[in-house]
Amino acid sequence: MRILAIIPAYNEEMNVANTVSNLASTCPDVDYLVVNDGSSDNTGLVCAQNGIRHVDLPINTGLASGFQLGMKFAERNGYDAAVQFDADGQHLPEFILPMAEAMVEQNASVVIASRVLAGEGPKGARGLGSHLISGLIRLTTGKHLTDPTSGMRMYDRELIHEFAHGFDIAPEPDTIAMLARKSHKIVEIPAHMEERQGGESYLNLPSIIRYMSRTCFSILMFQWFR
């Protein structure tokens, strides 16, 4: 099974080299592509100096389009699965192969690395938002997901094609809800995650509230009619 780790990176000069090094040493058979999403710091330079396979976008386009670029690369190069993998060191590469095993054994379209199943999970406002999103997904799809906001998700070949060519599909919980309604099998495995290894997250309280509100509204309204 050929797997591509897509690593979106925006201003991750402090983390990207260690993240890729850890991935390569832990999972030498998993390929990767760093998508430098118009970073204003030296993310691209760090990638170039360390021989990291990457592509530099001239401006910041956001997670959806950066991830789509990675999915286009995955499709054009014949990968069987693609995993979304953060550049900040939070995601642990030792869970990639168990995700792939779950995908094959359970014939799943999506495998989510669940912090909740591992006895962890987001806290505070993020935790409340995650519980709310989980409830809305269950209400609208009948599917119970313990960690819908986990950013470590693996997609099969069919969904690689969907992400590569869809103009309104993003690697977000509302898309997971849509895929569940369309009868794609979604499973979770327990996975530990680390704290951000350096730099600052864009997720402060106001942005968390905006993100959760937008996601909940999308699940209830826009995604419902797709």
Image (cartoon, helix red, strand yellow):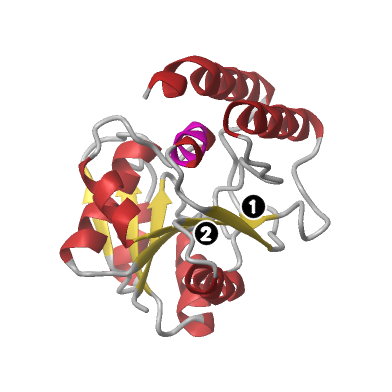
Q: Which mark is residue 144?
A: none
The residue that label 1 is drawn on is 196
- Where in the figure is residue 132, as x and y percent of width and height? 71, 27
The residue that label 2 is drawn on is 15
Residue at 24% across / 56% down in the picture?
A: 55
Which stretch did the figure color magenta? 174-179
Mark nearer the N terminus (2 vs 1): 2
Label 2 close to label 1 by CB (< 8 Å) = yes
Q: Amino acid at mark 2?
A: Asn
Residue at 44% across / 40% down in the picture?
A: 179
Residue 84 in the image: above or below residue 97: above
Q: Regarding mark 2 in the picture, which secondary structure is present there?
A: loop
Instruction: Report, in whole angstroms, how far the alpha carbon at label 2 lies from the one at label 1.
Output: 9 Å
Q: Amino acid at mark 1?
A: Arg
Q: Considering depth in this image, is 189 or 68 the residue closer to the camera?
A: 189
Residue at 76% across / 47% down in the picture?
A: 121
Asked if residue 124 is among those painted magenta in the image, a careful observer would answer no
Q: Residues within 10 Å of mark 2 (few under 14, many from 20)?
A: many
